Image (cartoon, grey):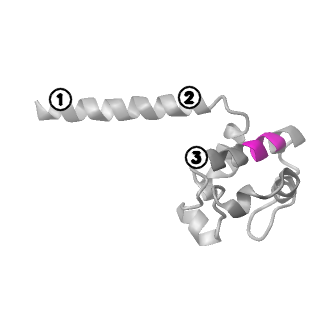
Amino acid sequence: MQKGLVKYAFMLLAVSALTATAVRADTPGQKTYQAKCAGCHGADGKGQTGAGKALGAHDFTSPEIQKMSDEDLTKIIADGKNKMPPYGKSLSASEIKDLVAYIKGFAKK
């Protein structure tokens, strides 16, 4: 009986994870964030991934980042900063705008 309960618990976790991803997939900027930012900044924006720790990735939930203007964040994304590469040539202006809004959304989490 315990095997069945454990199997059921894992199924619930898997479905929950897929549902959470599916719900957030419609958020503007999320797809770009997952492709370009999450590797270092993490899915939660806190920069606690292996790469993020090694590179000193900023925590997007921090007051320091959240108080930055949209223009400042746009410039950093487009031009790069420190160890972060520039994305101005690989992302459109609307993708960067959506990405900035997505990053600002970490303040609410």
C-alpha distance separating marks 3 and 1: 34 Å
Q: Amino acid at mark 2?
A: Ala
Q: Say which residue appears at 54% left-offset and 62% top-offset.
A: 48
Residue 44 percent across, percent down from the top left: 57, 50
Q: Amino acid at mark 1?
A: Gly
- The magenta stretch is 97-101
Q: Say which residue appears at 57% left-offset and 68% top-offset.
A: 53
The answer to if 8 sits in the magenta stretch is: no
Say which element carries label 1: helix
Please name the residue that numbered disc 2 is placed on. 22
Q: Residues within 10 Å of mark 3 (few under 14, many from 20)?
A: few
Viewed as shown, does residue 1 lie left or right of 84? left
Name which of mark 2 and mark 3 comes first in the sequence.
2
Q: Residues within 10 Å of mark 2 (few under 14, many from 20)?
A: few
Residue 81 percent across, percent down from the top left: 80, 66
Please name the residue that numbered disc 3 is placed on. 109
Viewed as shown, does residue 36 lie left or right of 89? left
Say which element carries label 2: helix
Q: As rendered, which of 72 and 42 lies closer to the eye?
A: 72
Is residue 7 depicted above or below 36 in this figure? Answer: above
Q: Main secondary structure of the magenta part?
A: helix
Residue 79 percent across, percent down from the top left: 87, 60
